[in-house]
Image: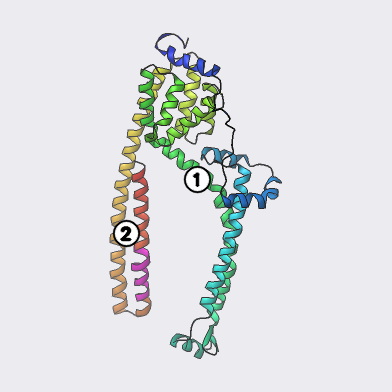
Amino acid sequence: MATAGADAPLRSGIDQAMARPVRVKRGAQPTHSPLSGFQQWAWRTFRDKVTARPPDPVLEENLVKAHMRIRADEYLAQVYGTTIIATAVLAVLGILLAFLLAVPAYDSAASAAMAAGTSTSFGSVVINAPLVFVGIALAVLLPIAGWFMIPPLLRGAPGSRAKSRGRQIDLRISQAMSFVSAMASADVNIDAIFKELATQTIYGEVAGEAAWITRDTELLGVDILTAIKNGAIRTPSKRFQDFLQGVVTTATSGGQLKPYFLTKAEQYERENKLEMLQRVETMGLLAETFVTVVVAFPLFLVIIIAIFAIIGGGGAFMITVLWLIVGGMIPVSQAGFVFFMYTLAQEM
């Protein structure tokens, strides 16, 4: 049985946690996570619209996995409020851009356009006909794009944040399992292991997951196995979920937790080394690609276009292309590679 041998303290910790009463400060009352002023306004304004629809289980799950302390209906109200305000701002911005494009100040270029018959003069202001259509398109398309694009982006934000937390958990899980195995080797109870892990902020999001398990046991009165099961359900990391499910399976099947922790620590350490090696190889490949695509290719392209501009026709067009390459293509490609390399370096 699990209570026999060196694993007895871990199992006894489980039994004690199942019978432990909930202790809170005298006079303490449960409170809801406070909403900001904007969230309160959005909830008052769009409450009826949000509650009229059935709840979204995917959004609720992502909010929990992202550790965002807000209900799904309140978050939807925030999405509606943000969409309304952002669409109004985009509409005003589109009107301003349309005015600036369609009514440029009178200058030599505007007078030439008026002489060509593409502009109309009103005193000291020239109305450029082609730019009028561009301005109208901006004034119309910007708010429409905001109205249809902002809600999906905001609704997908909790899922993106949950995935980011999952990557952070996977990044620190090897070190966290070494800590857990060391605590288990000292015959510390399992609930005390997770409570101590929750205080170790060096382990990042792993400590956050352990804190929620400790909250369930000490504040909500849930036994440790049920708290670990709930933690396995709500964690965004597949590896940490596998670890927690293994803890429950080992404890309920009569196995010993100490060898399980040691085995998992060794497994995650091996996997972490392999992932580090893969990232280093990826960064080396990206460095070679950077030299070829961002350094050599634009250089040869600039030389070829400059030669065509000298010996061929279309000199003004070639100069414009050169400006686009030098001022647009090269900085954007370099910024993209820097961002990607920075992202890989953060995961190491």
Residue 187 at what x, y percent from top left? 39, 16
Is residue 1 rendered to the left or right of residue 294? right
Q: Quadrant of residue 280?
A: top left
Please tell me whether residue 273 belongs to the stretch shown in magenta.
Answer: no
Q: Position of residue 185 (x, y in %)?
A: 36, 18
Q: In this rendering, which labeled residue sits more in front, label 2 or label 1? A: 1
SS label for mark 1 = helix
Across and down, in percent, residue 72 comes to: 61, 43
Mark sitting on residue 160: 1
Residue neighbourhood size for the residue with mark 2, other residues' Cα within 10 Å, grouped as few (<14), some (14–19), many (≥20): some
Using the rendered image of the protein, determine whether residue 314 is visible from the camera's viewpoint: no
Q: Of the two numbered discs 2 and 1 on the same chain, state the one appearing first in sequence.
A: 1
Residue 321: say if magenta. Answer: yes
Q: CA distance from mark 2 to mark 1?
A: 30 Å
Give the amino acid at mark 2. Val
Side of 30 relative to 254 (left or right): right
* Front-lying residue, 36 or 209: 36
Kind of residue indicated by mark 1:
Ser
In the image, residue 71 above or below residue 129: above
The residue indicated by pointer 2 is 294
Judge left or right: residue 275 versus residue 255: left
Which quadrant is the C terminus positioned in?
top left
In magenta, the rendered stretch is 319-330
The image quarter containing residue 306 is bottom left
